[in-house]
Image (cartoon, rainbow, N blue to C red):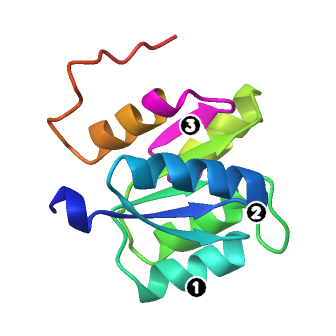
Amino acid sequence: MSKSRERILIADDSPIVRSFHSNILKSAGFRVDTAIDGSEALEKVLSNDYSLILCDINMPNMDGITFLKRYREEGKETPVIVITTQEEAIHKKRCYDAGANLYLVKPIKPSSLVLHIKILLGRGDTGGTEARWG
């Protein structure tokens, strides 16, 4: 999929976080849609094609883990990055068990977020930046 066609869904109940992440991704050349909770996210992903999904854990109506489980139960394989303030290992395990491809803890540098997305999308244009794990 070409850069101009890559479309990302951001699911987060915080309007500030949605706007912040949306601006970062639009600046990097991605098309962006947003959802305020897991229910809206599930509705959007089942009726649209996305290259990647960014998802918070703590959201009203349907949390991120429930969203992930239901999305994967539909047989969908689109990469999902969970991006949350929850640092505890139990949350990380629950997300990976539900089908997350990557678990990131907020706050995250904009350049790191874009790099992780490009890596998951299999993009070679990471700008020579090395991912630092740890």
Q: Nearer the viewer, residue 101 or 121?
A: 121
Closer to us: 45 or 8: 8
Camera-side residue of 73 and 41: 41
Task: Give amino acid for label 3.
Answer: Tyr
Disc with the residue nearer the chain's start (3 vs 2): 2
> Quick one: SS at disc 1?
helix
Q: Looking at the picture, which amino acid does disc 2 mark?
A: Asp
Q: Residue at x 64, y 67 (%)?
A: 67
Q: Would you identify the image quadrant in which residue 19 lies?
A: bottom right
* The N terminus: image quadrant: bottom left
Secondary structure at numbered mark 2 = loop
* Dot 3 alpha-carbon crowd within 10 angstroms: few under 14, some 14 to 19, many 20 or more: many
Residue bounds of the magenta highlight: 97-111
83 is higher (above) or lower (below) than 46: above
Total residue callouts: 3
Residue 7 occupies quadrant: bottom left
Asked whether the viewer can see residue 100, the reply is no
Q: Amino acid at mark 1?
A: Glu
Mark pair 3, 2: CA separation: 15 Å
In the image: residue 52, left or right of residue 104: left
* Residue 16, position as x, y percentages in the image: 75, 53
- Sequence order check, earlier mark of 1 and 2: 1
Q: Could you tell me which secondary element the residue under label 3 belongs to? A: strand
Which label belongs to residue 103?
Answer: 3
**Badge number at residue 108:** none
**Residue at the disc numbered 1:** 43
For residue 115: magenta?
Answer: no
Would residue 72 be visible to someone looking at this image? yes
Q: Position of residue 83 (x, y in %)?
A: 62, 42
Q: Which residue is mark 2?
A: 63
